[in-house]
Amino acid sequence: MRFALIDDQRVEARSGLKGLCPGCAQPVIAKCGTQRSHHWAHRDDMKCDFWREPETEWHRSWKNNFPTEWQEVILPDQQTGEKHIADICTDYGLVIEFQHSHIHPQERTSRENFYRNMVWVVDGTRLKNDYKRLLKGKDNGRALKPGVFLIEFPDECFPLMWLGSPAPIIFDFQDSDSTADPTDMRNYLYCLFPVRVGPSVVLTVWVRNDFINMTINGDWLLWVSRSMDELIQYNKDIQYHNERQRQVQTNIAFAKFTRRAAPYRRGRRF
Ligand SMILES: [Zn+2]
């Protein structure tokens, strides 16, 4: 973790310092080696929040896009007393979790149920083929409007463990080789949206800074809510259209049948 408490102040790790974990109040020691970012660690590698993964440079650089007081925020469940440390919790109540390693679907669901109002940011560089198959899915997808695509075969384009999440998931493919070249598609962020259109999933493409700015100023939550409403309405319109088509086809078939049956009816005596 980045912050520990010393005299009730959040303090970053510096060589020789000792502090208290803000989550469990146990002593933590400053780790200031050269391999990893300076951080605080519990003794004996004890983890007080079993959801937390070892922090990488990728985590640290994402967190640094946000005010320090929004980083590593302790969130308790008022009823059970269960506590977890959110990577980011904004003043608008949005939790942002940065996930680098593999996560078991059950743990993913537990975190989503606990935080509720959240967005995942996933390090897409961990598995080599994930970027290629997502980009292929986007290129083969149907553009609903600029930057918004319908992907018909999501199993072929996204890691299975992220499909079916009720939260938006941002995939980040930028790595140490990335340049600022605007044509490099790795500089964009790819959001898997939590509402399907028929069998298709919805993918939106984001300029990195737009996503960050919108989470900071609160517009992200408005955008998610508005987009959910639009897609739910879009689904209803499609269902209505399909139902109308089905009725028209039924009526045509019935009209053909009655025309064929008419001569027999005329000749029948009662
Ligand atoms: Zn702790």
Image (cartoon, rainbow, N blue to C red):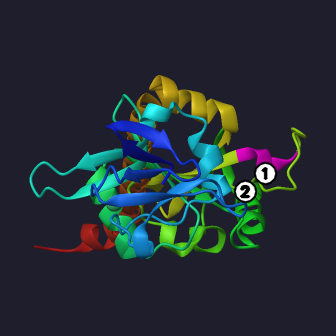
Image position, residue 73 (x, y; %)? 37, 43
Q: Quadrant of residue 7?
A: top left
Where is 267 relative to 173, above or below?
Answer: below
Whether residue 171 is visible to the viewer of this picture, yes or no, is: no
Q: Quadrant of the C terminus?
A: bottom left
Ligand 1 visible in quadrant: bottom left
Q: Amino acid at mark 2?
A: Phe
The residue positioned 42% from the left and 54% from the top of the image is 242
Residue 201 shows which numbered tag? Answer: none
Q: Mainly helix, strand or loop, the magenta region?
A: helix
Distance of label 2 from label 1 (alpha carbons):
5 Å
SS state under label 1: helix
Where is 22 relative to 41, above or below?
Answer: above
- Which residues make up the magenta segment? 184-188
List the single residue furthest toward the front: 16
Return the residue at label 1: 186
Circles 2, 1 touching at the beta carbon (< 8 Å): yes
Front residue (pair 192, 76): 76
Q: Amino acid at mark 1?
A: Arg
Whether residue 63 is visible to the viewer of this picture, yes or no, is: yes
The residue positioned 36% from the left and 52% from the top of the image is 85
Return the residue at label 2: 173
Front residue (pair 104, 49): 49
